[in-house]
Image: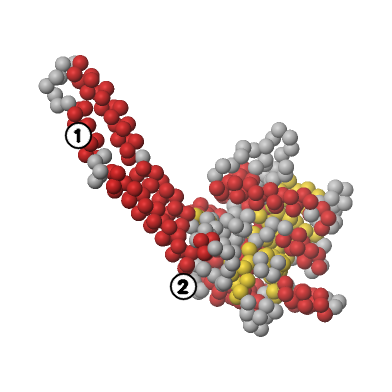
Amino acid sequence: MNHRLDAARPGTSEPYSPQRRTALVLTGTGTAGAYHAGVLRALHEAGVKLDIVAGRGIGVVGALFAAVDGAQRLWDDKGFWRSPAVASLYSWRLVPLVAAWALALAVAIVAVPLVTVAVGLIVFPIDFLVRIVGASGAPSLVAAYVDAAQAWFAPTALPTWLPRLVLLVLGVAALVAAIDGWRHRGRRSRGGIWWGVLRPPLSAAAVFDHCWRVMWDLMRGAAQVKPPPVADLGRRYTEMLSENLGQPGFRELLFAVHDVDAHRDLIFALVGESRRRGLIRRSTIDAADARRAEIFDLAGVARDHIADAVAASLSVPLATEWHAVTFSPDAYWRGETHRLGDRAASLIRVIDELIDLGVEQIVLVSATPESPGPHALADVRIDGRGRLGEYVQSAEAAVLRDQWPSRAGRGASKWRPADRTARSAAAAARARARQ
């Protein structure tokens, strides 16, 4: 695995010490998780002591497994990143696929007259050559073609059914989009009704299901037991982690998601008993109230929302749907339904929370490469996922460059690819995981 371990502030970093309280932070989106898996394996083989694991985006998946001594399930033969399901983690939704195929079919139908004319350009030379070689008694290809063309372009033929067929194909696509928008309509919304049809193009359902499927394989062991509903599985996970904190391989857990409706980041954490009060306790009542709006203690009733929080962390803004969460009537938000998602800059909030929890050194892992500098830019991606990936990668790189030095203290370090592009970094991580 190609990486560089560099200090957050040149000249002020201290070497890693197992005597200090250490946090591992995994940050990234999509296939960046493969790089996380490679780094986790390297840390595991090096015997690095970790007291708490944290993450945002796809990093939450790595943190979930690392917290329960299950990081090997990220890179082993039956692990998360070795599964064929990885190829379609963020798949295109049905409506964009139907729309693309309908458009292609409509263009093909409209092209029928042009194809007919093109066939004539072939028929005339062939007929001419046939007559030159002396096959004058053969049926005239031109005459046959002209007769067929007259039949095709008769008022009751192509001019009539071709536009109808195009309208039928596009109408079916529009109907599918309308039904999909109606089925997934959420709470009362503003804007034209047609905006409800134009939903995000990608789906995060596959990566969410794959995460909990691999987690269930880890938790059930050799027992052939049918997996429970994801909400129940999430509760079992938090109970297992809470009961085993302090045991070898089990670590405290913290991750952040963004609440679009409340305009704030939410922190989901499961920490040791001695630190639970510190999650909420503040010097003033107003400050404590604000903390209750943002902090979810997974050792308590908030464990019912861990699956929702994971789903939210895996959503990509604008590319996938926000994840809707209905809070408990007894919680701070009084039964409201909020839209949650990922946010690159929430990494800074994660680091702030870790410092508040007494973390003395942080190992930050990101698959975003360093800036290549002049005359070393990569080729521009023109595919849909590539364009989105470039922006997400750039946003995360900006957070790391501008905010990390001001937040990270002594003993902080970053693991980032030495390769020039995120694609080569992910490939290096996958190769490391296969070894």
Residue furthest right as drawn: 11
Colour basis: secondary structure
| Neighbour tally class for label 1: few under 14, some 14-19, many 20 plus, Cα within 10 Å | few
Give amino acid for label 1.
Answer: Asp
Q: CA distance from mark 1 to mark 2?
A: 66 Å
Camera-side residue: 140 or 435? 140
**347 w.r.t. 378: above or below:** below
Residue 17's tag is none
Find disc 1 in the rendering and name its residue: 147
Residue at 44% x, 64% y is 179
From this view, report whether residue 372 is shown above or below residue 195.
above
The residue positioned 63% from the left and 77% from the top of the image is 336
Secondary structure type for disc 1: helix
Residue 262 in view here: yes
Specify the farthest residue to the bottom: 330
Q: Is residue 83 above or below residue 209?
A: above
* Residue that appears at 44% across and 50% down: 100
Q: Residue at x 69, y 70 (%)?
A: 262
Quick one: 282 or 168, which is closer to the camera?
168
Report which quarter residue 255 is drawn in: bottom right
Among the 4 quarters of the image, the one containing residue 343: bottom right
Which kind of residue does numbered mark 2 sit on? Lys
Q: Please name the residue that numbered disc 2 is placed on.
A: 226
Q: Is residue 24 visible?
A: no
SS under mark 2: loop
Q: Earlier in the sequence, mark 1 or mark 2?
A: 1
